Amino acid sequence: QQEMYPSTNQVLLGRETPKHYGITSPISLAQAKEADLVLTHRLTEALKPYGVFEEELELQRRIHVLGKLNTLVKEWIRDVSETKNLPASVIETVGGKIFTFGSYRLGVHTKGADIDALCVAPRHVERTDFFSSFLDKLKEQEEVKDLRAVEEAFVPVIKLSFDSIEIDILFARLALQTIPENLDLRDDGLLKNLDIRCIRSLNGCRVTDEILHLVPNIENFRLTLRTIKLWAKRHNIYSNILGFLGGVSWAMLVARTCQLYPNAVASTLVHKFFLVFSKWEWPNPVLLKQPEDCNLNLPVWDPRVTPSDRYHLMPIITPAYPQQNSTYNVSASTRAVMVDEFKQGLSITDEILQSKAEWAKLFEAPNFFQKYKHYIVLLASAPTEKQHLEWVGLVESKIRILVGNLEKNEFITLAHVNPQSFPGPKEKEVSTMWVIGVIFKKMEASENLNVDLTIDIQSFTDTVYRQAMNSKMFEADMKIQAMHVKRRQLHQLLPNLVMPKLSFCSVLQHSTEGLRQMNDSSLDLSLDSDNSMSVPSPTAVPATVPTSTPVKCGPLGPPPSPIAAAASQPEAPAVKRPGSPMQEVRKRFKSDAEVFNLYCPSREIQFSLCSQEFPDNIVNCIRLRPT
């Protein structure tokens, strides 16, 4: 059982470095100074409000639940052994055990986090037993809720809630007659003659245990990793599936930092983390140990042998055999975004170490919705909650393909997907939205440049629909829609919770831009503008797919509400021209005022909603006031 917070004594354990860690010599063996310990204490205090530490009572409840689960596994394996007529002497010693891995095993899980677990069984217990008789045993437990088996997954799993704690249980059958209590899963010999699904299931535990064995001081590693994980989540770069880094990748980067600075405490390690990885020469791989070949003929990451490995942009290699790259989803855009965040993190921690800033500054969430001028909003919808859950999972797993398509567009320099998804408009269907920030290349005379993204988006949607039909999960009315919107239009699409950081100036900017647009007679301000694209649902695959409306980057009016209202209409709708400029200003100010007053109630300056008339120079009047 790990401590929730590192004590000074635990932190000081880092002063003793009994052996050399990592594939290179340390960068520095400098010992921690008193100032470093003070900064580390402040860091711990700064982390507490974010719920990254679990209360002792909750921790004990997890230990109790895992104990119960371990007992169930042992009982089940004994029962299976009896049905297979094993000798009584063997049944008494047959064993079986639950191992944990992931954030819980690393000791960095947060409040309410789920637990990743592995059920290890002896050779006479089959995988079919796990998904039948063990599943039945779990159904009998009154503490077990939301039980479901995903037997056909790449890594088969049973998911459940045990006494309100979410647990994912994998299964591995070892080539052993009995499972000893002191079994070390890092032993490569255990992989001999194993089914590939068992090898995959073992991998999580083996990697987690290797990481813990490869850091000089576990408590310093844990506090540093808690910090970096929180920072990554706050800065929207924590998502393996969308091309950023997942938990194990962040853990390996922190572990490598600990190896390079073995005597440093957490406050120093956080700073060194940003220093090392803001300057890292990608695609040089991050390795925690020299890869070893166990001659088991399993595929390992090796760009000298495997051509596809040469195209990985940010390789972080798992330390357990068979070594894999944990970041194969990273794209040019996601790497660029992460490296930029590393540089900003370095700048902030420089200030913190110089007492020019507090740790809270590191965890300030940037406003993704103010960062870019152009966005693509992706909407996945389905008729029912159950269908929507499956559909959203598939669409999300393929969004990185859309990002890759956009990156290849000659007019686009960066496509940044926000890992956070949002509920779509409340209509008959259940829907989820994702937002992708886009930077277009600066071209000469490009003010009126139209960039057609139809092919990029159509290719992505074709891939999703094809997989849905191949896996027989596709249902009628499962849809994907995409549209290009400008920054000032986002508040019409996104739920209120994502727009609290609209500054007073930005609200004014929306209004003044709207005024300028309304005086431009060439601009179409109709709600049904051509900034959306709907891909038809292939309920029956036609001989030719209907051509969708091009998604263009040009001067656009406000997005439709509800989203893509005209997407399925084959003919362009009649253009609805605006009323007088002042009527439109009045409408826009009222709308923006509602946004402003909702999120800035403490400000002295507020828009007046009761006035029936706005003076012609209201924009200039308000712009002169302080923000």
Image: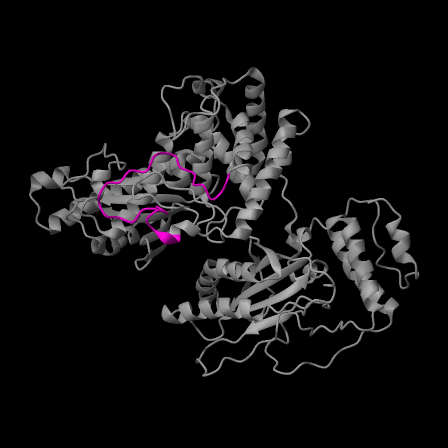
Residue 51 appearing in the image: no
Q: Nearer the viewer, residue 456 or 585?
A: 456
Give the vertical position of 19 relative to 527 (above or below). Answer: above
Tell me where residue 469 appears, x and y as whole percent. 40, 72
Q: Is residue 356 left or right of residue 258?
A: right
**Image quadrant where residue 454 sits:** bottom right
Q: Main secondary structure of the magenta part?
A: loop
**Image quadrant where residue 548 sits:** bottom right
Structure colour scheme: one colour
Tell me where residue 395 appears, x and y as whole percent. 48, 63
Q: Which residues are magenta?
A: 281-308
Tell me where residue 113 appears, x and y as whole percent. 45, 43
Residue 250 appearing in the image: yes
Q: Is residue 591 left or right of residue 241?
A: right
Q: Is residue 120 left or right of residue 537?
A: left
Farthest left residue?
Answer: 87
Q: Nearer the viewer, residue 204 or 318?
A: 318
Tell me where residue 236 appears, x and y as whole percent. 56, 47
- Give the residue displayed 59% in from the left and 71% down from the top: 533
Question: Which quadrant, please, contains the C terminus?
Answer: top right
